[in-house]
């Protein structure tokens, strides 16, 4: 990639630092999209030993890039995101990917196709961890930042995505226990 394209690509990625999510940090500051992606990547790194048959480097790449479309649209919480929102985000993302030089455009298109199809072990790990990181962050945030539907949504979020793995089901159960404890302490 030539130096000008690299700088322009980093400028697009910088938007992920600026766009906030519907998640709050433990000190009550809104989390950025970039912070979520970074910690999700860290989470993938630390579960590598649980999935020796998986290409964890690919999982980490998925974690790094999974919300890149939000560099163009900002974050829309899962409970507010419409099919039209998804379509617009996807169109903008693929337009950006297509503007990248070879081999980056080809590699990223293949990576996003794999993530969307959810057929490979790596795609399933990334998707499950993405859901788990969201609830982890909610559990760390002050409960005053939760909206009413999150009292149940946090317990359900990601349940389907962890079903393929005993380890991830156990992680979800542990995270749910933390959510329940947080909710009970609030009462």
Image: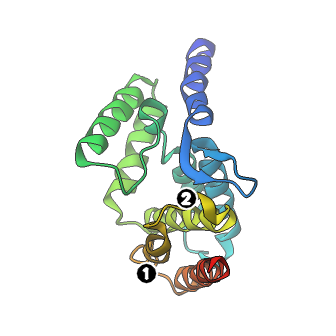
Residue at the right extreme, as displayed: 27
Residue 9 visible from this viewpoint: yes
Q: Is residue 164 left or right of residue 92?
A: right
Q: Position of residue 143 (x, y in %)?
A: 63, 65
Residue 164's disc number: 1
* Residue found 29% across the figure and 33% down from its top: 91
User: In this picture, is 75 found above or below 132?
Assistant: above
Q: Position of residue 187 (x, y in %)?
A: 62, 80
Residue at the left extreme, as displayed: 84
Q: Nearer the viewer, residue 152 or 48?
A: 152
Pointer 2: residues within 10 angstroms few (<14), some, or many (20+)? many
Residue at the top extreme, as displayed: 4
Among the 4 quarters of the image, the one containing residue 135: bottom right
Q: Nearer the viewer, residue 73 or 67?
A: 73
Residue 135's disc number: none
| Measured Cα–Cα span from mark 2 to mark 1 | 16 Å
What residue is pinned by disc 2? 59
Please state, as top left, top right, bottom left or bottom right, where the N terminus lies in the image: top right
Q: Position of residue 78 (x, y in %)?
A: 39, 55
Q: Position of residue 10 (x, y in %)?
A: 61, 25
Q: Nearer the viewer, residue 177 or 107?
A: 177
* Residue found 59% across the figure and 57% down from its top: 145
User: In the rendered structure, which disc, 2 or 1, sits on the residue that comes first in sequence?
Assistant: 2
Residue 103 visible from this viewpoint: no
* Residue found 63% across the figure and 46% down from its top: 30
């Amino acid at each position: 990639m030539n130096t000008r394209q690299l700088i322009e690509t980093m400028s697009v990625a910088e938007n992920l630092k600026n766009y906030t999510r519907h998640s709050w940090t433990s000190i009550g500051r809104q989390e950025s999209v970039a912070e979520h992606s970074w910690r999700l990547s860290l989470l993938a790194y630390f579960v590598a030993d649980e999935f020796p048959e998986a290409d964890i480097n690919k999982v980490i790449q998925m974690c790094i890039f999974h919300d890149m479309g939000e560099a163009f649209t900002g974050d829309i919480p899962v409970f507010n995101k419409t099919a039209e929102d998804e379509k617009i985000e996807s169109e903008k993302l693929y337009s950006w990917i297509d503007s990248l030089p070879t081999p980056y455009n080809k590699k990223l298109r293949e990576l996003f196709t794999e993530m969307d199809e959810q057929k490979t072990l790596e795609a399933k790990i990334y998707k499950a961890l993405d859901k788990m990181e969201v609830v982890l962050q909610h559990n760390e945030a002050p409960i005053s930042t939760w909206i009413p539907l999150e009292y149940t949504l946090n317990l359900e979020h990601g349940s389907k995505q962890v079903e393929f793995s005993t380890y991830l089901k156990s992680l979800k159960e542990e995270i749910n226990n933390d959510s329940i404890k947080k909710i009970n302490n609030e009462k």
